Image (cartoon, grey):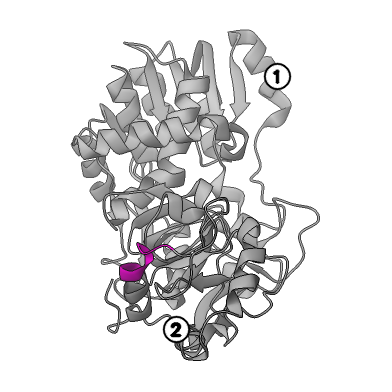
Amino acid sequence: MRAAVACASAAAAAAATAAAVPAAIVRSWVSLWPRCWGSAPLLQQPPPPRRPICYADHRLPTTPATARPIVDMSYARHFLDFQGSSIPKFMQKLVVTQLSPNFREAVTLLRDSPVPLPGDGDLLVRNRFVGVNASDINYSAGRYSTSVKIPFDAGFEGIGEVVALGLTASAKYTIGQAVAYMTPGSFAEYTVVPAKIAIPVPSVKPEYLTLLISGTTAYISLKELGELSEGKKVLVTAAAGGTGQFAVQLAKKAKCHVIGTCSSAEKFGFLKSIGCDLPINYKTENVGAVLKREYPEGVDVVYESVGGEMFDLAVNALAIKGRLIIIGFISGYQTPTGLSPVKAGTLPGKLLKKSASVQGFFLNHYFSEYQKAMDHLLKMYESQELVCEVDLGDLSPEGKFTGLESVFRAVDYMYMGKNTGKIVVELPHSVNSKL
């Protein structure tokens, strides 16, 4: 029967009816409790403060009409699916055990971590794909919170199927449903996800994963800060990367002229395929010289994620009233400070001279716009208006990124600048699964 969490208003009624239930029925009901999560069902005292998963049985008496019923016949089919999914007692996950920008030093692969239990408003998601982000090493270095304490779970985003859920969560989601999410702890075989932040998707495809952070960062930052309009010249650095690919396409949708920097002939070709007007391979061309020659009056908007020398070049390339949006500075993330040197001393004069601006963008500060952005991007992808390029590591020296142990390789691959599109790691699922 489908998993459910009993509401507080029904707890008293459950206790009252327990005495009236024949012993054989209670034994049958208890036998349904997953062994991997202990042997105590709801009729025994639940551990506060979280409300445990329980399973309805059609032979149990119903509660009075004035109380919210525990029994729901619709749970029967889902419980069978849930039992068939063979949720193990333990799972693998990546945990930050040492604060360091060196991901391999900071993160440990645990192979015997207990599978977590969802609460009333939660989903238990079996991850099929997880996304790798440049900021994963900022997270492992503890740069997002001065009060962070180790150990803590790594990873930001994932996509998979619901394999268990709480009663409140079951109002919107069902067992086997495909969902994507953005929450800490995605580098794991199973992740508990609050239902209120989960995003229903048509299927478990890695392309949907590319939108969660990379796509929404480009969409919201350009919409809120870019002031794009027809004919504007937009420079995108690291344009063939996870988020750069979306900045290029969204700027083109706004009828802008788009310039994109990249590091290989293959990436150059990819940028041309998604509509970039002028790709620049910085390994073979001088970016500053090309920008001066082709755009003597400067560019109107810069979508910047590299930092260091590239940031300085972008500032110099700004037009009158130009806007530079900083969404990251990957060139500095592996350093002890997390920063890459820039010519900050001359920055105020350069901005004043051009009435130009530099503004940072951090996705967490724009969550009020997040759902609207995701909805729009999903529609664009479904209608084939958006390319969501996924890099699963097929061209990496050791092959495809499969399994949590390959997350380490995937991070290295990103910092070597090898990826085209969003780096995604596939997590193989059990052959015993029916989902």
Look at the image and tell me in which quarter the C terminus lies: bottom left
Q: Which residue is mark 2?
A: 32
Location of residue 34 in the rendering, given as x and y in whole percent from the top left corner: 48, 83
- Is 30 placed above or below 340 here? below
Which percent across, then down, holds residue 268?
26, 42
Count residues near mark 2 (Cα–Cα under 10 Å), then give few for <14, some for 14-19, many for 20+: some
For marks 2 and 1 on the same chain, the one whose residue lies earlier in the sequence: 2
Q: Is residue 133 visible?
A: no
Q: In this rendering, which labeled residue sits more in front, label 2 or label 1?
A: 2
> In percent of the image, x 40 and y 54: which residue is there?
173
Q: Which residues are magenta?
A: 72-78
- Under mark 2, the amino acid is Leu
Q: Does 169 appear above or below 320?
A: below
Query: Which residue type does callout 1 highlight?
Result: Pro
List x then y, in percent, for residue 41: 57, 80
Q: Quadrant of the N terminus?
A: bottom left
Query: Splitting the image into 4 quarters, where does residue 47 fall?
Result: bottom right
Q: Secondary structure at mark 2?
A: loop
Left or right of 31? Residue 15 is right
What residue is pinned by disc 1? 348
Q: Is residue 310 visible?
A: yes
Q: Residues within 10 Å of mark 1 (few under 14, many from 20)?
A: few
Q: CA distance from mark 2 to mark 1?
A: 68 Å
**Residue at position x 31%, y 57% in the image:** 391
In the image as oriented, which residue stretches furthest toward the right?
Answer: 147
- Is 48 positioned to the left or the right of 303 in the image? right
**Quarter where residue 429 is shown:** bottom left
Query: As rendered, which of 69 and 275 lies closer to the eye?
Result: 69
Q: In the visual, does 249 lie left or right of 118?
A: left
Q: Secondary structure at mark 1?
A: helix
Question: Which label was assigned to residue 194?
Answer: none
Residue at image x 53%, y 75%? 93
